[in-house]
Image: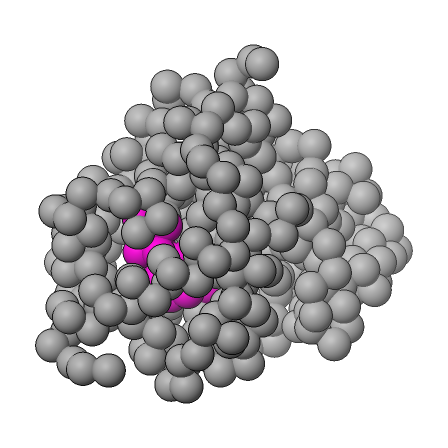
Amino acid sequence: MANILISPGKYVQGNGELKRLATYVSPFGNHALALITASGHRRIGADIESGFAGQEATITFEFFNGECSRQEVDRIMAVAKEKGCDVIVGIGGGKTLDTAKAVAHFSNLPVVICPTIASTDAPCSALSVLYTEDGAFDAYLFLPSNPNVVLMDTAVIASSPVRLTVSGMGDALATYFEARAALRKGAVTCAGGAITLAAMGLAKLCFDTLVEEGVKAKLALEAGACTKSVEKIIEANTLLSGIGFESGGLAGAHSIHNGLTKLDECHHMYHGEKVAFGTLSQLVLENSPLEEMEQIIDLCIDLGLPVTLGQLGITDISRTKLMLVAEAACAPEDTMGNMPFPVNPDMVCDAMLAADAMGREALGIGQ
């Protein structure tokens, strides 16, 4: 099996870069269709349009309907064709970006991705998650290539709700530990091959950056400041974790996240918040050294990420309920199979209970 690493064609991060969007679009086409929400356009539309003034490239905005569904992809494709657009731009959060990637793929057009939050590691990936019109999971759409450009405007991202960036840190926290597990297993990654030294190194750098900069970045964001720490965390959440998960591999943490989506009481939690607890549970499964587990629990507490089932919204904890999560986490099509040893639902249930106990101990709370 070959070692494979995939990544976006170009990654750009800096203050005010959305105002220079035209310079990143023009190498790919002269007429961009920009998918954005109506509220996003109210916030930053004028800045983007000002950057196209006097440029050969032009931009047309189309408002996103809110769901990355096959119907929405078809609708946007029709708009792009009608207006003669030759490059797709996605501006906003995950579903907007996934829709833009899918539209570009099916239209055989280049795509520029512009996240306005740093809450997940998805922007850099060759993947779109499709949902039904009602918001239920439909399918993973694996794309033949990563975005041509990923553009991160740090000023815009730093002004988003702090909880979103912290959630991104929770998502990024799993990157190294899942890649480590997949490496031990010799698993095939989302990139379609074995893990490269580069991917493993980026996954470890992602973790080290979270440890060193995470709390400083959170405090700065809460103070309304965009500091070097914030810039490093934006890169860790997006680029390092993006390449790390896609070319390094997913394992127990994300499969437990997927299992937690089965519980209605967890639906108010963000993706990265559930992944953080999934990471603790994966470390229990691996019987990781106590020092490592305590480091992760302490970091999560300092960042405000959940370390107990109660913090996830599960107040009525029963083995029957947790087995629903565990069975979903161990589904054949999920990533629990990338753990370096066989895992069954009973093991996952026990790991979640033990992780919850350790979290409550660290917080000084009882049953």
Horizontal relation, residue 109 to residue 155: left or right = right
Q: Quadrant of residue 86?
A: top right
Give the residue displayed 81% in from the left and 60% down from the top.
Answer: 70
- Residue 181 pos. (x, y %): 39, 35
Q: Where is residue 101 in the image (x, y as percent from the top left)?
A: 67, 48
Q: How many marks?
A: 0
Find the magenta span and give its range: 271-283
User: Can residue 130 be spotted in the picture?
Assistant: yes
Quarter-of-image position of residue 318:
bottom left
User: Residue placed farthest to the bottom in the image?
Assistant: 316
Q: Quadrant of residue 78?
A: bottom right
| Relative horizontal placement of residue 279, taking residue 87 as reference (left or right) | left
Secondary structure that dominates the magenta span: helix
The residue at the point 35 percent across, 74 percent down is: 309
Q: Nearer the viewer, residue 52 or 304?
A: 304
The quadrant in which the N terminus is found is top right
Write the residue at 45% across / 36% down.
Answer: 341
Q: Residue furthest top?
A: 2
Q: In this view, does 64 lie above or below 53?
A: below
Residue 180 x/y as whole percent: 36, 33
In this orientation, does residue 235 appear? no
Scheme of colours in the image: one colour
Image quadrant occupied by the C terminus: bottom left
Residue at figure coordinates x 34%, y 67% from the top left: 353
**Would residue 101 be counted in the magenta stretch?**
no
Q: Is residue 359 above or below residue 264?
A: above
In front here: 92 or 193?
Answer: 193
**Image coordinates for residue 303, horizontal then vertical, percent:** 21, 65
